[in-house]
Amino acid sequence: MPTAKDPAKTTGPAIILVEPQLGENIGMVARAMANFGLSELRLVNPRDGWPSEKARAAASRADHVIDATKVFDDLASAVADLNFVFATTARERDGFKPVRGPVEAGRALRARVEAGLRTGILFGRERFGLYNDEVGLADEVVTFPVDPGFSSLNIAQAVLLMSYEWMKSGLADETATNFSGPELV
């Protein structure tokens, strides 16, 4: 069974959602986070307010994430205590920030957390993502290798991808599985 190098010492990056619209999406984000050992969710000005029963229902027992969620009035406050932040985006931003893919970003986050830094991953609005000035608050950009003709991901899917890469980066063997079947010949 794969295990993180030392999960007790690595709290993981904070997940920051900017102006999330639907409680259901927030709940699915919480569930994706819990699947991969993350628990710190920060919301910036959620459209329908907080707390949300729709979020709790969609979280499917990730209540510890929902209960610990912090709400901020603005993005600058949400990232103020973090030493390093990735902004996720599908749009090219004129090269003003270094850009990484999700695998490399997961490893970079792991290295920073293991060095004692507080990190975060910033996700934009469901409808149109992040403004350039919001990306400007991040240190680097992470983008997913998706079809350029259909590059927009659901926010919970994007969080799941980065949460997976975070967890995978802490495994002693990234190819190990939680259980095994018959031996392949």
Image (spheres, helix red, strand yellow):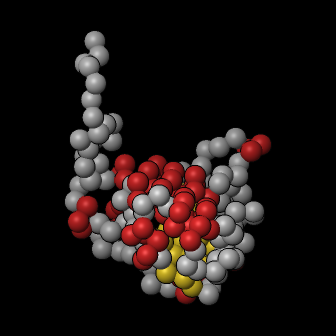
Q: How many marks?
A: 0
136 above or below 170?
Answer: below
Is 116 displayed left or right of 45 in the figure?
left
136 or 166, which lies in front? 166
14 or 119, which lies in front? 14
The quadrant of the rendering that contains the N terminus is: top left
Is 103 displayed left or right of 6 in the figure?
right
* Residue 138 locus on image (x, y percent): 57, 73
Residue at left offset 65%, top offset 70%? 20
Residue at left offset 29%, top offset 16%? 184
* Residue 66 locus on image (x, y percent): 47, 71
Residue at left offset 62%, top offset 85%? 74
* Residue 111 locus on image (x, y percent): 34, 62
> What is the quadrant of residue 150 in the picture?
top right
> What is the quadrant of residue 10 in the picture?
bottom left
On the question of residue 74 being in view, the answer is yes
Residue at left offset 27%, top offset 29%? 180
185 or 132, which lies in front? 185
87 above or below 5?
Answer: below
On the question of residue 105 being in view, the answer is no
The quadrant of the rendering that contains the C terminus is: top left
Is 177 displayed left or right of 16 in the figure?
left
50 or 20, which lies in front? 50
* Residue 102 locus on image (x, y percent): 51, 51
